[in-house]
Structure formats: C-alpha cells, structure tokens
Image (spheres, rainbow, N blue to C red):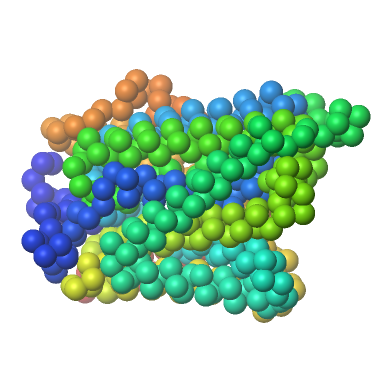
Amino acid sequence: MNDRSSLPAASNVECSSAPSSGQAAPGHVARHLSVFDAVCLIVGIVVGAGIFALPSLVAMGAGPAWAVMLAWVIGGFICLCGALAYGELATTYGSVGGEYSFLHRAYGPGVSFLFAWARASVIQSGTIAATGYIFGIYAARLAGLAAPAPMLLALGAVAVLTACNIAGLRLGAWTQNVLTAAKVVGVGGVIALGLLVAQPVAPEQRIAAGEASLSGMGFAMIFVLYTLGGWNEAAYVAGELRGRPRAMLKVLGFSIGLITLLYLLVNLAYLRVLGAGGVAASKAVAADVVSQALGGTGAAAVSLLVAISALGAIDGCIFTGGRALSAVGDDHPLLGRLGRWHERLGTPATAILVQSGIAAALIVVPNLSPRLREVMGEDLEAAVAYTAPVFWTFLLLCGLSVFVLRAKDPQRERPFRTPLAPLTVGVLSLACLYMLYRSVLYKTWSPAVGLVVLGLGLIPYFASRRRNNQ
C-alpha cells in the first residue's frame, strides 16, 4: 500500500516542492502558506457571523448560564477530539484535496465523489451563500440601502473574494490575514466592553432563564457546533503548508485553542451583561451588549464587525472549497477541468469559479419569489438546517477513517498518531451521530432538501464511471 502508483489520483496530489520562482508549475502545488497564514485562514472561517447571532439560540436551548457555558465547553472539547483525529490524517495523507483524499483512500471513489458533490452543492456553497447574505444585510444597513441591496452586496462580496483567490495564493492569504486580524480585534473589543465596561442589566429587569434539560442541551449543541464549525477546513491547507507535519499540528492546536478561548470569553461577556434569559430573548445579542457600553453607536460598530467577520468566512470558504473541487477533477476525467491549476497564478481557478458560481446561484434563487425564500431560507438558521445532516454524515466518515486507514495501510509512516484514539475518535463519532439525529429532527424541509441534493450526485458519478469505462 505504500506504492504511490497504487493510490487514487486525488491522493497523488500530495505536494512537491515549489519552483524557485515561487509559482506553482504545471501539475505541482507550491508550499506558500506559513503557520500564521493557515491559522488566520481557519480562524477566519470559523469566526464568522454565527458568534454574533447564534448564541441566542444556544441560550434558548441550554437554559441557565452554567448550562450555556457548559455547552460551549463541550463544543470545544469535541472540536479538540476532531482536531486530534484530523492531525493524524493530515500529517499522513496531507494534500490539497483534504477530506476528499481521506475519504477516497478509506472508502473508495463513490463516497469521495458524493462528498465533493455535497461540498459544492450543499455544505460549502450553502455556507458561502448564507454568510454572503449576512454580509449584504449588515453592509446595506450601514449604508442605509434597501432591497435589493443586500443581495447585490452579497454577490459583489463573493465576486471580489473569488477574484482575490484566483489571482494568487499570496494575495488570497494576505486578504484573509487582514480580515482575520480585524475580526479578532473586533471580537476582543466586544469581550472587553462586555466584561469591563458595559453595565449589566438590573436584576429586576432581567428575563428569567429557562430550565436545563437534556433535550434542550441537544438543541443548543446544534448551534454550538455549527458556530464552531470550520476547524476541519485545516485539512485543505496541508498540501500548501510549509514545514509539515509539525506545522500542521501547530495550525490545529493554535487555531482551535484561539477560537475556543474567544468563544468562551464572548459568551461570558454576553451572559454578564444580559443574563441567560436576556441572551435567549435577544435578536442581536452582540449589538445589545455593545449598546450597553457605547449607546447608539454600538449598533453601527457591531454591524461593521459582523460585515467584516462575514467577509473573512466567505474568503476562507472559497479558498478551501476550490481545493476540494480540484481534487475530484483529478479522479474523474469527465470533470477533469476542475483539476487544472492555473500555470502562472498557481491556483485551481476553474474549481474556484464553479464553487462561487453555485454559491451565487443560491444567493439569487431565494430572491426570485417569496415562496422560494420560504422553502430555501436566507439566514444562518436556514443554512444550519440545510447543511447540517450532510455535514455530520461526512464528518463521521472522516473520523472513522482513522481506523479504516490504519487497517488498510498499516505500513504507512504516521508522523502523528491520534492520542487515545479509541476515546478521542469515539467522542467525535458519537457527537456526529447525535448531531445527525438532532439536525434531521430540527426542521422538516431543509434537511430533506439537502439530502435529496446529495442523492442527485449519483447521476454525475455514474455518468463519470461510464465515461471512464468507455
């Protein structure tokens, strides 16, 4: 199994050294990314608009303040277990294909193709579209513009960030670093205002928190883990990261540690000012907290912060989404154009364009009629319902692939082995199963739509197989 000639094509995209010019030569991928670049990318993806909107739903489900904080701690622990599993996979099989390559090696071309199809049509595109619309709403609010400005601004953001990612890895990384730095500073400002400056709501004005319950905690965990989602995108930087495998472990450790710390502190700030009941009742929890400290200017400041955070998340999702699609193009000649990297720019230009085109369609289609908007949704809650079942299914398969690949490829050198693998991978797997169960029950239509779209991926897969056989 160590013979590279026996491995699937996607897995052979493991990256060679870049030419001296610093650009990727045809068929090669240059290692441009530093640990700092990669950490900024992951933090930029995870710290999106969700942390400013979804803590209300977490508090609504969890109940009292201690249960709210416990939900975020549990979420951080699950992500840590996932990061340890991905640490083994990424350092052993690191390539630009990321999870696609893991699934291809572990389960074969059918599962990996459906995964790539799901990322393009459900997971990544749905996240880009929903986050783009969040950017459009807040940017239009800041500019005092009415409909259709939010949609047009969302499309403009996707177009500009797509161009930055196609133009070259260095420009894309620089853009992401600036956006991530801005949002981390902004979140730090919310934390400082909430913990040190804002006056807490008077006890007699506080809304009573709900009761803690197991079912309520399950509801809360849907949104905790969605808000923390994106740490797994680290798998897609392994092929372009300098100094792996040690660097890969630093990326996972630093990014998840920073994200968990930020999220715990910002939720502590929310709870200090508003109380658990107030957080649950708030429609704009970050704005309410900042307004307690800055008055009327607080809402504008938070709107700007949400807009910047959304841009960072969109940029990161475009970067990693293009890498997954480029990998499927290497394995399936019918989609071969997706696997081509631009010779001069060193980026998977076609794959990035296709990914962003699908996301743009998902931004536009719900606005064609009120009925479509009702069915598809246009906000983060709708994105959670649409993407969650598919996301948790494939995350479960990726976690279990640690054991599958150890059995299939026992002679492969593993620079890092998941500590306490039965326990850590077991925690990740059980969490995925539970979240899959909860996310299917959460809504009726949106999860069904996502699963139907996933099933439609069998059509191009069998068409590709037939083409290969011919």
Q: Residue furthest right?
A: 204
Q: Quadrant of residue 224?
A: top right
Q: Is residue 178 above or below residue 155?
A: above
Residue 352 visible in the shown view: no
Residue at the image position 31 percent from the left and 27 percent from the top: 418
Residue at the image position 19 percent from the left and 32 percent from the top: 415
Q: Residue 430: percent from the left, percent from the top?
A: 50, 30
The answer to which of 123 and 405 lies nearer the viewer is 123
Q: Quadrant of the N terminus?
A: top left
Q: Is residue 2 above or below residue 463?
A: above
Q: Is residue 73 left or right of residue 81?
A: right
Q: Is residue 33 left or right of residue 265?
A: left
Q: Is residue 155 above or below residue 428?
A: below
Q: Is residue 30 left or right of residue 55?
A: left
The answer to which of 458 and 113 lies nearer the viewer is 113
Q: Residue 181: percent from the left, percent from the top?
A: 45, 50
Q: Is residue 10 above or below residue 469?
A: above
Q: Is residue 204 left or right of residue 59?
A: right
The answer to which of 411 and 166 lies nearer the viewer is 166
The answer to which of 145 and 221 lies nearer the viewer is 145
Residue at the image position 56 percent from the left and 65 percent from the top: 132
Q: How many numbered discs, if any?
A: 0
Q: Quadrant of the C terminus?
A: bottom left
Q: Quadrant of residue 146?
A: bottom right
Q: Residue 384: percent from the left, percent from the top?
A: 60, 51
Residue 46 visible in the shown view: yes
Residue at the image position 24 percent from the left and 62 percent from the top: 331
